[in-house]
Structures are given as structure tokens and as C-alpha cells.
Image: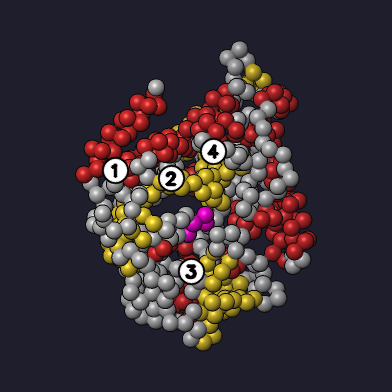
Amino acid sequence: MFRNLCLIIFIALAGLTGCSAPDSSDTLSISGPFEPISLDPARSGYIFSRMQVIETLVDIDNKGQLKPGLATRWEHSKDNRVWTFYLRPNVVFHDQSAMNADAVVNSLNIAFSKPAPYPQDLVEAVTALNESTVQITLSRPYRPFASLLTNYTTAILSPASYNESQEITKLSGTGPYQVEEFQPPHRVGVTKFQNYWGEPAHVSKVVYTTGHRAETRALMVASGQTDIVYNLDAASVDLLKVSKKAKVDSTLIPRTILIKVNASYPALADVKVRQALSLAIDRQGIATKILRVEDIEANQLFGPSMGVWHDATLPPAEQDVKRANALLDEAGWLQDDSGIRHKNGSPLKLNMITYANRAELIVIATALQNQWAQIGVDLRVHMENASAIPSGHADGTLQLALMARNFANIPDPLGIMLADFTSTEGGDWGPMGWQNPSVFSALSALPLVQDKKAYASQVQNIMHQINADLPVIPVVFYMQQSAVAPRVENFSFDPYERSFRLSDITLKPAS
């Protein structure tokens, strides 16, 4: 009855908002929760990569394999220290200047000087060997270096994009779309770039609008106000499927909803406590009842698409409240009459932060609050901006954070692991205060391993240790939910979230 009432209200609201239509019949209108705040790829490159304004030397296919981008090929020295990239010919920037080795060197030198998901001291020199060849020398051997150059922070921009202080004043990239309008943090408009080096875009103009709430975005696409919406929650997906106002696309992506743990916080320093928290989670319930998706329970950090970093032989992750209680008893946390556990007079009270960009997170956090209460843990949940997570990591105040970690920022997981799992400093979106010298040492040695079988064996050994020690606690793998209006054709979702694939889309003519 309640669901039917919700559907009636949803359809009625969609009808009321139906008077608002996309900007024009040849304009594609899209919406998501993302807030573009800057033209700088180091800050908002993810949106300009997805809008196909900026491109990188190396690209990724649907299976996470590297493929040519603005470089047609590359090679490296035997020790993985010197990398040579051969540039694609006849590429021009949006300001009509030619992309050559000097422009690429300038762009990369600026990019490597800014915060990015790779070690800041990794690149020693970037040089132009000739007009079409760039050589990058590293400070040390680094096997996954080519995969770093798929990250949007390394996008190649025209020299005219920068002022004298190397600040970006006009974003001039190489993609099939160019920026026409930028109203941070709510709107980006792009138009077709006529001199694109590859297949030209079909739709002449695309407008992205930030929609903060999933239900609002669902109404926007149901009413015809927007053509494509991203990051929908389960309730909105259900209503859209029943109302048949838009087609829902569901894609499993290399992203894991997990709990970031401050392992230096006294209550969380004991691995038995971390294991107890993990065992108390009803992952199947979260997957099927909250997210309405089967078989996405995370029994490890990386999902099935991550090659040797995923162990398909591991048993499913099952809730075991009895074992969780026993582990807390062993750790010296005993329950009193109130049901809350105490140790040395201190209650087992924990703070967890999460954020609103992904609507399901606060619902999952509330479920965790209830599930952990069953084992005597008093969990307080706080809704913050996503920036509170790296901020809390930096100042040491964070205890727990529920987040959806994107493992596609660097398609080779080794790059992420080297950045986040090789020191007690951890990473903004990874471990915090975790100490495991054995893992640190083994991971640091991986870039030197050349034999594929030995490499896979060592990766599996490392991941077994991480899965047991739980510096982060995996909850579920991520199913991306999008909705597409009937007039949109050739939609597909990039599982690595680099592109909205706007240039592939066509629009049905108005009837």
C-alpha cells in the first residue's frame, strides 16, 4: 500500500514538473551529485574528463586494460624507470593550437607539481625528445606508471590554459567537447569541438546540472526535464522501473563501499575489535534490502573485475554475531547492564562520518549503527561533506568513515596500494594509523617483480594479510544506477567512470 502511494505521488510530481524540458531539442541535459568547483583538473578534473573536455596520454577499456589515448604507444626501460610516449599526430587543442611534445611536457610538469593519487616524488624529469615524443624519467622503478597517466589529474592542456602563475584561467583540452559555460558548483555547458582528432560527437551541446538529492534527479528524468541522471538510490530506481518514465541502467563498477578505520585510535587498534565489527555486519541484508541488488556482498577489498587482486576462492562474507561477541570478550570489552561494552571504565563508543553525495551511504550507516548495537557498540553517525574524510585523516580526529571508494582512479590496483598501504600514514581514502611492516615491505617490493606468476602469487599473499588485518572494512561492491530518458540512444556507462560517453549518444527527433 505504502509503495503504491509513493508511486502515485512520484508520477504526480513528475507530471507537475513536466513543463520544464531540456534546454532545446538538440541539447543533451544530464545531472548528477557532483559539484565542479574549479577548472583545475587537480580539483575538478573528474567532471571535465566525464564531460569529454580533457583527455590523457593513456586510456582504459571496459575491462580496465590500458589502451592508447593521446599517446599511440609507449615503452619503458627494463627497470621501469624511463618511460617513452609517442604522441598521436594531428591533435589540436580547443584553442586551435597544436598538441606537440613541448605542450605535453608543460602540462605534465604542472600536473606533477600538484596533489594527485600517486607519490609526489616519483617523477624526476619530463623531457621532449622531439616534436612527437616525450620521455619521463622516474626517481625509482615503478611498474604501474602508465596506469597513472590515465588519471584525470594528468590531462593534457594547452599552454594557453595557464596564466603566469600556472593557474588555469581557461580550460583548453583535446576532447570532442569544449567548455562553453562554467558556473561553479552547479552547471557546466559544453559544445561539440569541430576539429576533434577522433570520431566526432553527435549531439552539439550538453549541459550538466548538479542535483543534490537522488529523488530530485529521479523526478527530473521522469518529468522530461533531464535526459540522463546518475547515482540513483534504490528507492528512486524502484519508482522509475514501475513508472516506466525512464530506462534504468545498472552497472557493477570497480568501487567498494567500505569503512575507513583509524587503527591508531585505542579502541580500534586491536585487530579483534576490527574483526568483530566486520563479523557483525549483515552484508546480505544491506545488499538486498537497502540497495536491492543481489550478490554484491564484499568479502574482500577489490571486486571481481580487478584481476589477480581479487580472490575468487574466498568464502562469502556472512554475519556471525556470536563470533563477534566472543572476539570483543577476548579483547577485554565487556557488556554491562546497559548493553554497552566497557574496558577499563571506558565505553565502546565510536563516531562514524559519511557524506550525502551517494544517497545510500547514510542508510547503510544507520543499518551499521543498529547491527553494531547488537554486539554492544555505541555508534554515532555524522553526515558531513566528503571533504571531512581527508580532513579528519590529516588532523587525526577521524575514527570511522563510511565511503564509496573508487578503485578506478588508477586502473592498476598496484598504484593505489603503493600510495595507501605502504606506511602508517595510509591515504585520505584508505587506511589510517595502520601498522603492518610485512605488508608494507611486500608491497614496496612488487614493482620489481617481473615474472607474472610470482607477481600474482605475491599479490594474493598480500591481500590475504590485508583481508585478515582489516585496515579498512569492506561492506558491499558498488552497483552504479543511472536513468535514461526515452529520446536518448546509444547510452552506455563507463565502469571506470572516466567518461559519460556523451559523444556516442544520439537523440531521437521530436515526434
| Residue 236 visible (yes or no) | no
Q: Quadrant of residue 49?
A: bottom left
Label located before the other in sequence (3 or 4): 3
Residue 74 left/right relative to 23: right
Residue displayed at 57% across by 23% down: 373
Q: Name the residue under label 2.
A: 248
- Measured as percent of width and height from the top left, residue 375 is found at 62, 23
Please say if 446 is above or below 328: below
Q: Which residue lies furthest to the front in this view?
A: 511
Q: Where does the image place residue 423, in percent across and percent down from the top left? A: 65, 52
Instruction: Determine which residue is flagged by label 4.
Output: 293
Residue neighbourhood size for the residue with mark 1, other residues' Cα within 10 Å, grouped as few (<14), some (14–19), many (≥20): many
Disc 2 from disc 1: Cα separation? 15 Å
- CA–CA distance in space, label 3 to label 4: 34 Å
Q: Residue 95 carries which label?
A: none
Q: Is mark 2 on a helix, strand or loop?
A: strand
| Residue type, label 1 | Ser
Tell me which label, 2 or 1, sits earlier in the chain: 1
Residue assigned mark 3: 56
Residue located beneath label 1 in the image: 223
Q: Which residues make up the magenta segment?
A: 494-498
Q: Under tag 4, what secondary structure?
A: loop
